[in-house]
Image (spheres, rainbow, N blue to C red):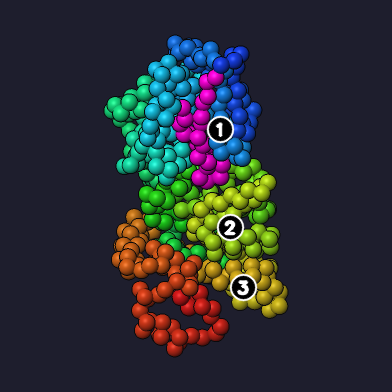
Amino acid sequence: MYIHSHVDRGFSGDFITIEADLRKGFPGFDIVGLPDGAIRESRERVRAALRHCGFQFPRERVLINLAPADIRKEGSQLDLAIALTVVLALDSLQSGRSLAQTAGSARLMVVGELGLDGSVVPLKNVHGAVECATREGCRLCIVPNQVVHRHPALEICRVENLTEAVRSARAFIMRSPVDSGPLFETPRIAKEREDPFAHVRGLAEVRRAMEIAAAGGHNLLLFGPPGVGKTMMASRLGFLVPPASETVAEEILRIQATSERGITYNKGIPVRKVLRESRLDALLGSNAIHFPGEAALSHGGVMILDEVNSFRTVFLEGLREVLDRGEAVGHKNGHRVIFPARFQLVATMNACPCGRLGQGKGECSCTREQILRYWGRLGAALLDRIELRVPVEAESLLNISHDNAYAAANAQIRIKQAVERQARRFCDSSAPWMRNGDIARYPHEERSCIDPALMELVDSVQVGNLSYRARL
């Protein structure tokens, strides 16, 4: 008898087949296929769970194989699958039916940790298992009783204990309908209710630039003297960014599920503020292969780099590659681990080494060479990937006192309308474009959706040395 299961590794995890063989000999229970300590300990959890739920453990010698055998399996999420495989193999032996007849065309995925009393413990990354079951063509997925995604092509059965799991699996194999119970809807990525712009006055040009960045998916750089509101405004961009699509929302939950922080619902799109002392592995992922880095954790949301030119050069080089690829690639022990990492970058910095450039005439004491060297720390390649570079100047008290409160709700309506216009513009394009910012990320794709007259106008008014990406 065999069924399928899933173990976490990276973003997608591994699809596992669990086989059971009952043979004559001294009673025993062995698990092969590169199991880790937690899986080897599952033998005792499975024995206890079967006994507490009233099932007989086979008197034969039990051999469990975890395939493929060349992949190390870690964690306790295989407990329920191993127990079910043992029970169904014993059913096959007692009924006299062949294993092939018992398995039939059953494409069954089972995940869950067992308690000693037979209860099924919720998992941290059940979403990855459900997605894997859908991708591999399974027809039923038995999971713990917790929030799960709804998939049209996959029947999902949520169980609280081993007895319910066995009943559902037997019914499925015998072509009987399975009562999967009510399912939760796919969790939506909710927005924060509080308007973070309620107390912001002035900075009208910055607010307009943030609207454009949010609507078009553009990267943004705010620069100016200290104390003018760069960091404050950068931290608020996430409120304006449109909600994630269903596909991206699911990817966000799966990435969060593989991180040390676990799954977080209804906390809005990811907004990650990266520490300037961060190393490259903090961006791409730590040495622990399960835990994604800041690039992946920012997927579908916003990454904030405050004082961006204070970051390590190797970090900024790695960031440029992530922006180009749209994914974070890490390596460990010969394994290549890939996480999606498509996000909006918002960075802040002073305009010069002394920080007084932009405060007023004669305030800055930096030479031209010092300023060029200061900006040179970012590198021309990274700057070329930041479409909007906006100076932030100190607002006068008169402008602030006469400025009306920024209506973020009205801005979100304008942003939504802009997103809809972009969707209509790119709907017939074969390029992977959804918003204007994607044009700069994929500059060499076909450009049938871009008005040729507009490109001619850009060429005719071009001043300075603009790159091909900057012209797009």
Residue 276: image quadrant is: bottom right
Residue at (45% x, 86% y) in the render: 459
- Does the magenta run of residues contain 13? yes
| Residue mark closest to the camera, 2 vs 1 | 1
In the image, residue 348 sits, relative to residue 128, either above or below, namely below
Q: Which residue is mark 2?
A: 305
**Percent coordinates x, y for residue 24 in the rendering:** 56, 16
Which of the two marks, 3 or 2, is nearer to us in this view?
3
**Which residue in the structure is indicated by mark 3?**
380
Mark 3 Cα-neighbour bin, 10 Å: few <14, some 14–19, many ≥20: few
Q: Residue furthest bottom?
A: 460
| Residue 285 in sight from this viewpoint | yes
Q: Position of residue 51 (x, y in %)?
A: 49, 11
- Label 1: element kind: strand
Please say if 203 is above or below 108: below
Which residue occupies the foreground of this view, 283 or 158?
158
- Amino acid marked by disc 2: Leu
Query: Closer to the N terminus: mark 3 or mark 1?
Result: 1
Range of magenta residues = 1-23
Residue 235 appears in the picture as rendered = no
Find the distance from the CA under tag 3 to the CA under tag 2.
17 Å
Q: Residue at x 46, y 53 (%)?
A: 300
Residue at x 38%, y 55% (from the top left corner): 242
